[in-house]
Image (cartoon, rainbow, N blue to C red):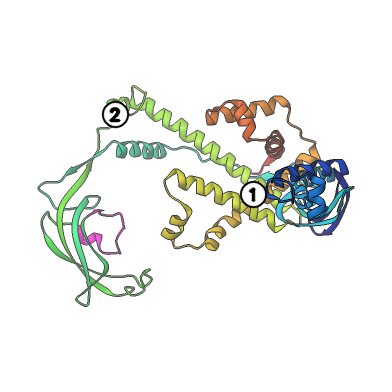
Amino acid sequence: MGLKSTSKVDTNRVELEVEVDAQTFEAAVDRAYRKNINKMSVPGFRKGKAPRHLVEKMYGSGVFYDDAINDLYPTALNEAIEQSGYEYVEDKMDLDVVSVGKEGFVFKAVITVKPEVEIGKYKGLKAEKKIEPVTDEDVDAEIKKLLERNSRLVNVEGRAAQSEDIVIFDFEGFIDGMPFEGGKAENYSLKIGSNQFIPGFEDQLIGRSTDEEFDVEVSFPEDYHAKELAGKPAVFKCKLHEIKTREFPELNDEFAKDVSEFDTLDELKTDLKAKLEHQREHAADDDFESQLIEQLIDGLKAEIPEAMFENRVNESVREFEQRLQSQGLNIESYMQYTGMDNESFRKGFREQAEKQVKVRLALEKIVDLEGITPSDEEVEAEYAKFAEQYKLEVDKIKAFIPKSELVKDIAVGKAKELVKENAKVSA
């Protein structure tokens, strides 16, 4: 089996002419005969017992050719693609058998291939890298989060509701004296000041007492999402059942011991500051990288086949579906909840997919230009990382991830690091 010739028929579409030799084809025809003989009747022979030459004489010499071709062409095509030097893109494929007989068979396949790529400057790029300093106020905000996580709700006795309280109440809304859909709830929990309700509603809960019944008078905003309610005045009849407030622990060394491995509050604050500084350094590095990537994309010149974008969208959809399944959901339910159809759902992945494809092409070009080749040690180290991540043996990881694909991924990662290492931080 081998590649006879290649010819470009369109942008990123290449025709391969592939030949399968007589010996290989004959072996495939014989396999097809053995696979199908039990289904064929030949006078004078029980099913499965008729010799091949008699079956071919009765049904035609090419009776097993289709099965033999279907058996061989995937392997033959893959070998031809590898010999051609083109990188195949999963897409529609046009197949045409040119000739077939005892001498073997020849077929043509028109495939989509990766585009020819040109990139601009990738060394000496400039980008900003600004690390925001961590202030005492930032640390205090983290402390406040810890206090909130370790607080508890307690019932309020002997006073009226005030801002930041959580109230449990019933309400029913009326417009022109008539109730409207979605305007009623019982034992609803609301934090006053959270702005969950339309403007003016929550303010009128302040000063109300437990078991009090009262009216809240408001007007729906002109741009309210429910058009039938937009701009209309409404009266909500309410009854307050409970008032709760959040009780926070005392902020001292004992608190630090309870919520961390540190003995003092000062030690806890020092640790929080270090973590914030690390986060901001990481965020600045990510932003620096993003700026460089955008410059690579701007310098990319390639006529990218639509199939590459669609394939990347398909991968994103599969990844999203896996995340939903881990939460006990599926895509159909998700689209129903969000009111999307398949087209709008896929459209949400399109922009990111285009960027990912372009970045990959640019980095792969850098790999070629720089001759980047990962070492065997780097490949084995990457396999070991995956094995640790997924808690599987390395051999099982190797069965899932072909070495050729992993080598490409490592090389692309090294190309990205090369761009970053040779970049300059602009003022």
In the image shown, does 158 or 368 lie closer to the viewer? 368
**Residue under numbered circle 2:** 255
Q: Residue furthest top?
A: 263
Q: Residue furthest bottom?
A: 176
| SS class, disc 2 | helix
Residue 336 screen position, x and y as percent: 43, 60
Residue 57 screen position, x and y as percent: 82, 52
> Which mark, residue 356?
1
Residue 301 appears in which quarter of the rendering?
Answer: bottom right
Q: Residues within 10 Å of mark 1 (few under 14, many from 20)?
A: some
In the rendered view, does 227 fall on the left or right side of 12?
A: left
Residue 20 magenta: no
In the rendered view, does 39 fall on the left or right side of 372?
A: left
Instruction: Please give the count of numbered marks on the rendered protein.
Output: 2
Residue 72 appears in which quarter of the rendering?
Answer: top right
Which quadrant is home to the C terminus? top right
* Span highlighted in magenta in the image: 188-205
Question: What's the residue at 17%, 50% (across, down)?
Answer: 243
Question: What's the residue at 46%, 46% (across, down)?
Answer: 325
Residue 117 seen in the current view? no
In the rendered view, does 142 fall on the left or right side of 303?
A: left
Q: Is residue 356 above or below residue 239?
A: above
Q: Is residue 405 above or below residue 163?
A: above
Residue 411 screen position, x and y as percent: 71, 36
Residue type of the residue flagged with mark 1: Gln
In the image shown, does 112 or 179 lie closer to the viewer? 112
Which quadrant is home to the N terminus? top right
Residue 108 appears in which quarter of the rendering?
Answer: bottom right
| SS class, disc 1 | helix
